[in-house]
Image: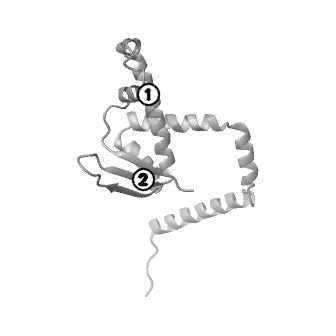
Amino acid sequence: MHRPRLAALDDMLDKLEERRAGLEARLRQAPAEEDFEEKVKKLKAEVSPQAVELIINSAFYYMREHADSETKQPFINIVRQSIQKVVIAKTPGHQPASLEVHGRIASILAAMEAATIMEKQFEALKRPDYLEKRRAGELDTEQKQKKLLDGKRDFRCTLTPTR
């Protein structure tokens, strides 16, 4: 039994054949192997680690403070890949639960914790009553200063980086 030719199918096959030929031509023009090691060395020479860190921190700040859920989702997936294990444990009495985070994310969280402390210190300096409290001796010990900066915490966090 012989089937009649379909013009639409012939057109589709012709287009696919043209596309295949174009892709083969592009493959022949591409260099056989690229030297990525040399490219990485060149990139490292052009970009400082401080600039990269600033860009990453700025991106995380934007994501945390201003992005919508759809924009945040790819970053959330990246963060999830950096977590090995999270352990939430009871604590005695009415103390808040403890949280242990294991994995590469721990160093990121530690950096964010340091940034949060610095942010709180800056906010405290902006408060009009800060200088008054300092002059009155209400901030003369490290414990009193810490109390002013810390506020309330919902949990204790232990960070365990992975190597």
Q: Which sits in the foreground, 112 or 138?
A: 138
Residue found at the very far left of the displayed protein: 94
* Percent coordinates x, y for residue 101 in the rendering: 42, 53
Identify residue type, mark 1. Answer: Glu
Spatial distance from mark 2 to mark 1, Cα to Cα? 28 Å
* Percent coordinates x, y for residue 94 in the rendering: 23, 46
Q: Is residue 104 above or below residue 58?
A: below
In this image, 30 relative to 12: left or right? right
Asked if disc 2 and disc 1 are in contact, CB closer than 8 Å, the reply is: no
Q: Residues within 10 Å of mark 1 (few under 14, many from 20)?
A: few
Name the residue carrying label 2: 101
Residue shown at 43% from the left, 18% from the top? 125
Inspect this view and state whether residue 104 appears: yes
Inspect this view and state whether residue 60 appears: no
* Percent coordinates x, y for residue 83 in the rendering: 45, 55
Residue 130 picture quarter: top left
Residue shown at 35% from the left, 14% from the top? 129
Residue shown at 37% from the left, 15% from the top? 133
SS at mark 2 in the image: strand
Q: Is residue 154 above or below residue 100?
A: above
Residue shown at 68% from the left, 60% from the top? 27
Q: Which sits in the foreground, 136 or 130?
A: 136
* Percent coordinates x, y for residue 8 in the rendering: 45, 65
In this image, 93 relative to 148: left or right? left
Query: N-terminal of the two: label 2 or label 1?
Result: 2
SS at mark 1 in the image: helix
Colour scheme used in the picture? one colour
Q: Residues within 10 Å of mark 2 (few under 14, many from 20)?
A: many
Identify residue type, mark 2. Answer: Val
Q: Which sits in the foreground, 26 or 4?
A: 26
Name the residue carrying label 1: 142
